Amino acid sequence: MVSMLKGGLISIEAAMGSLKPMERKAAQYILEHPEEVVKLSVQKLAELADVSEATIIRLSRSLHCKGFQELKLRLAGDLSQSSLPAESYQEIRTDGSTQQLIESVSHNNIVSIQDTLTVLSAESVEKAIAVLSGARKIGAFGIGASAVIAEDFKQKLTRINRWCEIGTGFDMQATIAANLLPGDAVFGISYSGQTEDMIRSLAIAKDSGADVISLTRFGANPVSELADIRLYTSTLEKSIRSGAMASRIAQLNVIDILYVGIAGAHYEESVQSLEKTRQAVKVGKRGG
């Protein structure tokens, strides 16, 4: 339903760093006057923000909206919930009580997932599940902290008998990518979307004819630009330390969504594989 659209404010906050200067100027005006903007025409907003009408249209598309009207609907959805994303996160302090530490870390993780729901396209998730479900081989690529996410994805797919190879460095990623064929898929995980080795390895996979799926933070970035299907997470904390933690939780949530979707596409087979692997591990432990 149209009335359920939301995520305009979060999308703008998350994309600010990747916007062009004039788009950023318009975005800043929207963030400062959201209640006013939902009532404006594109012409009037352009006049008030001192940018061109074309800039407003480009900004809307940069935020993955079909046009300014959809952006306004998303802003209206945010305002109806009285949620301003920039104020949602709590700074994690090391000089507070243990109870404050528990509450602030948990709160930020919860908000990270909630914010991600506003920038994660159901249509893109559906396409990703379809591609991954039908793929002969899947390459899961992640470097540094993202390697942990890729490893989790591989482990889940292995449990349901889906072929998945993990690449946590360029040499392994390039080797996997070079041997992929049309009908195979590669899943590139990079929060920043700026990792050079990931960009190079995904380009190889694309040249091999594989479908490329990306999981990055919201906004334009080189990794998502290479992808056929783009999935996004959103974390807006000011602290690098808390950002690294909450982004991981948001990414793992997307992994769980994909896993359940893939398992559901092959339900009977997946249930059998889960039971077989459970029994195998149980027997192995008893034998040891």
Image (cartoon, rainbow, N blue to C red):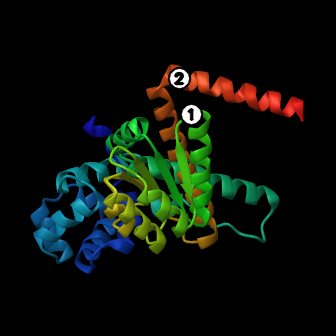
Q: Could you tell whether 200 is left or right of 69 in the image?
A: right
On the image, the x and y values in percent for residue 265 come to 44, 28
| The label number, if any, that marks residue 2 in the structure image | none
**Is tag 2's residue or tag 1's residue first in the polypeptide sequence?**
1
Q: Quadrant of the N terminus?
A: top left
Quadrant in the picture for residue 23: bottom left
Answer few, some or many: residues within 10 Å of disc 1's Cα (few below 14, many 20 plus, some between 14 and 19): some
Cβ–Cβ under 8 Å for marks 2 and 1: yes
Q: In which quarter of the image is the C terminus?
A: top right
Towards the viewer: 227 or 92: 227
On the image, the x and y values in percent for residue 151 come to 61, 52
Q: How many labels does the image show?
A: 2
On the image, the x and y values in percent for residue 81 come to 41, 46
Q: Could you tell whether 269 is left or right of 31 in the image?
A: right
Residue at point 51% right, 33% down?
A: 260
Residue at point 35% right, 48% down?
A: 6
Label 2 is placed on what type of residue? Glu
Q: Mark 1 points at which residue?
A: 161
Answer few, some or many: residues within 10 Å of disc 2's Cα (few below 14, many 20 plus, some between 14 and 19): few
- Residue 242 visible? The answer is yes
On the image, the x and y values in percent for residue 244 come to 60, 65
Residue at point 17% right, 59% down?
A: 40
- Residue 111 visible? The answer is no
